Image (tube, rainbow, N blue to C red):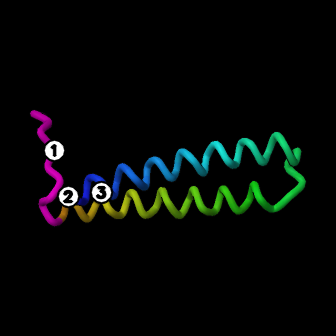
Amino acid sequence: MLKAAIVLLLLATLVSLFSGLFFLVKDEGRSARVVNALTLRVTLTALTVGLIAWGFYSGQLVSHVTW
């Protein structure tokens, strides 16, 4: 369940990234839609990092790195 939520947040972040690019090209940076897309992207990224940290803290995510 946690991994699916992380993947969904990453996909939503990518959608926000490309929507911000579209608004930047279409509006030439003159509207607030680019700022709103950036705000949403930063929020989604913070939620993703928080979920990953919580997953490691709770033991639901485990690193198999040998070092």
Residue type at numbered disc 1:
Ser
Is residue 66 found inside the magenta-colored segment of the image?
yes
Q: Please, what secondary structure does the residue beneath circle 2 have?
A: helix
Task: Name the disc covering residue 17, or none.
Answer: none
Q: CA distance from mark 2 to mark 3?
A: 6 Å
Is residue 62 found inside the magenta-colored segment of the image?
yes
Task: Name the disc covering residue 56, or none.
Answer: 2
Q: Are marks 2 and 3 in contact (CB under 8 Å)?
A: yes
Task: Name the disc covering residue 63, or none.
Answer: 1
Residue found at x 78% / y 48%: 23
Q: Residues within 10 Å of mark 3 (few under 14, many from 20)?
A: some
Q: Are marks 1 and 2 in contact (CB under 8 Å)?
A: yes
Residue found at x 60% / y 51%: 16
Q: Earlier in the sequence, mark 1 or mark 3?
A: 3
Residue type at numbered disc 3:
Ile
Instruction: Give the residues in magenta.
Output: 58-67
Quarter of the picture containing the N terminus is bottom left
Residue type at numbered disc 2:
Phe
Residue found at x 40% / y 53%: 8
Residue found at x 15% / y 66%: 58
Q: Describe residue 50's horizontal placement relative to residue 15 as left or right.
A: left
